[in-house]
Image: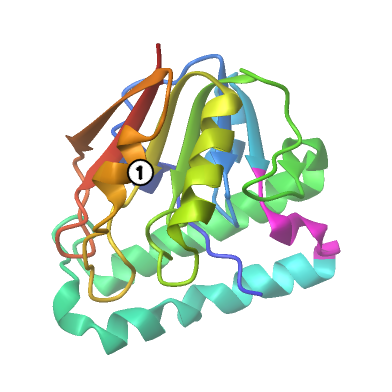
Amino acid sequence: MLVTSRSYAEYEAMFDLKELPDSVLDCCAGGAGFTAEAAARGVDAIAVDPAYELDHPELVDSVRRSLPATSGIIGEHEGSFVWHWYGSPERKDQYRIEAADRFLQDVAAAPERYVAAGLPDLPFGDRRFELVLCSHLLFTWSDKYDRDWHEAALRELIRVSNAEVRIFPLVLQGAGESIPWLPELLDSLEGVTSEIRKVPYEFQVGADEMLVITRT
């Protein structure tokens, strides 16, 4: 199991975060530094991921091994990535290293912020969080998780949100194909409105949009 790390700056751009509400869930967070930074800013921030079942040495090892591993997908689909947000591969690597360090320090200092669980079953009450974020899981891995799984996962993210769910990106990992059943899936959800919104971030070509689901 590899636990990918992403920085707070990447989250700000991926999810177009201009300000944070009182409570935020990051699902499934992996080794991201977002929760640590959000908590430092006074937010009730929780991260959830199945990887948090690992004991601490195993988690550290998984996070460290993930840092070079993501280059494999990029190398296989080199023409499907652009560098205008990061500036260079070296800068991207620096973001990820800093995020991994931030995560590993915080998970050791405040393990209660890191909950071992995964979609489509989350151990939180209804409407627990004002904002729920999900990056690089839904739609990204739709070649591994089918439409029914995605519907169950979306409904669970909506259940634990009191206001808004944001999901990024909306294309398949690798070459970045679109998800043909996404419009139909969104139409099947009740009690919410949905919007696909541009964000100030693009790394995978065409992956510059997030899905925003708002409870009505």
Helix, strand or loop status at disc 1: helix
Q: Residues within 10 Å of mark 1 (few under 14, many from 20)?
A: some
| Number of marks in the rendered image | 1
Q: Nearer the viewer, residue 1 or 112?
A: 1
In the displayed structure image, the side of residue 48 where residue 214 appears, left or right: left
Which residues are drawn in magenta?
A: 48-56
Dot 1 corresponds to which residue? 185
Q: Can residue 40 be seen in this view?
A: no
Vertically, is 68 above or below 150?
below
For this orientation, the residue located farthest to the top is 216
Q: Can residue 45 be seen in this view?
A: yes
Q: Which of 216 and 40 is in front in this view?
A: 216
Query: Measured from the top left, where is residue 144 in percent x and y?
Result: 48, 71
Instruction: Name which residue lies at 55% across and 74% down.
Output: 66
Vertically, is 147 above or below 160?
below
Q: Nearer the viewer, residue 48 or 191?
A: 191
Q: Give the quarter of the image for residue 127.
A: top right
Instruction: Name which residue lies at 60% across and 78% down.
Output: 65
